[in-house]
Image: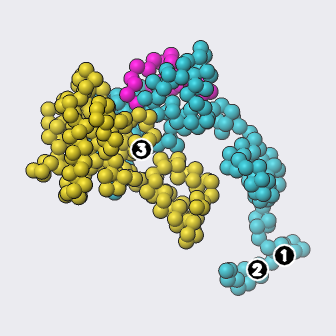
Amino acid sequence: MKSISDLANRVKKAFRNKEYRHAYVDEFLNVSIATQIKVLREQRNWTQAELGNRVDPPMKQTRISIMENVNYSSFSINTLRKLAEAFDLTLRVSFESFGCRLKDIEQFSRVALERPSFEDDPAFVEREERKITAATKAFPDVQERERIEPILSVVPSFSAEAAQGKNRPQLEDVLPRQKIANGVEDRSWEKQPMRATA
Amino acid sequence: MNYGPKWLTATALNLGGRPFFWNIINLLYSVNRFPLDFIIFLLYIMSVNGHWQLFDFLNSHGQNVMQVWAMGLSEKERGRLDAKIDLLEIAGGSLPPKLLTPTSGKPRQRNIMELAIKGQVALRPLLCRGPFNVQNEFTFLFGAIERDRKYVPRDAPQRAETNRLDLLTRGENGREKHKRFSK
């Protein structure tokens, strides 16, 4: 089976022709914008009508449907700016080299196109909040979450104290208790035979 | 049937939901209880190598019909064509919305799809899923163009269907790995 880097190599060769590479990236841009609109909408569990209502001024569902089509190419920056606001994201428009575009082609996937809205943006979420959000997302079922919470609370990186930088685990915490007795380090634990585990 | 933990399902879907690999992983997890580390490794391999396989139909003379069709195309048209075909190879037909659409006209050919490429000439390569492995393959069967919302040649979908049936009879000898259109 061909690997992604293999595809990138083939694309690189073909890009030597100017007309070819401009047509290629032009087409890729149309596909990636349409796909990202769809991916972002699905990431937020919105219908096309819901997205249309969140745009200011509201857009019809049919217009969203047209923009979510890889064959549509008449995007305006103004429309994209409105969509970015509806998704609570920022729009970035910049001139890029072909090498940069090559990376986008290689990494084209649902995950690569998803973006968190401001509320879920790791740069702005406090650590403790992030834990709750992540746990809620990973285990949407309340019963399942309650079952897993005691486990999460004993993991230092998930506990509330650790989030504030308190009670950071020390080396003593992970080594046997008898190690430090009367200020003298007892290293006898090192000589204990390894126990086979089932 | 046990579909494994939710996070595993979510990860697999995020990787493009390639059903063939996903079925294997699901089977390993539910039947043999393979170690999670091994499953994660498989998911990584999927993310790196999980491309769709593309093929071109060979006519009775052994000629690649798509390459013959593309002979007169300009570099611009080749670029547009290759861009969409590369995305089909990377992401399959489901992630980019309406990348593959059913053919128009009557009689309707249910197994044939078109890849629409806009431009001065509206290119319409016709293809089908599989036909041998419908889960991770596409085969290009016939090259057409569209003029005034009609295929040229008019019976392009029927010809593509004929080629598909011919391919099913001839087996793997009736096709070869897809060749890029770039010169």
Q: CA distance from mark 3 to mark 2?
A: 54 Å
Which percent across, then down, holds residue A180?
A: 84, 72
Q: Earlier in the sequence, mark 1 or mark 2?
A: 1
Mark 3, Cα crowd under 10 Å, few <14 / some 14-19 / many 20+, is: many
Colour mode? Answer: by chain
Which amino acid, mark 3?
Answer: Ala
Give the magenta part as a residue range.
A70-94
Q: Which chain is cyan?
A: A
Which amino acid, mark 1?
Answer: Gln
Which amino acid, mark 2?
Answer: Trp
3 or 1: mark nearer the eye: 3
- The residue indicated by pointer 3 is B91
Mark 1, Cα crowd under 10 Å, few <14 / some 14-19 / many 20+, is: some
Q: Residue furthest top?
A: A57
Query: In this view of the protein, can residue B28 be seen by the observer?
Result: yes
- The residue depicted at 68 percent of the width and 45 percent of the height is A137
Q: Which chain is yellow?
A: B
Q: Quadrant of residue A184?
A: bottom right
Q: Quadrant of residue B154?
A: top left
- The residue indicated by pointer 2 is A189
Kind of element beneath mark 2: helix
* Residue at mark 1: chain: A
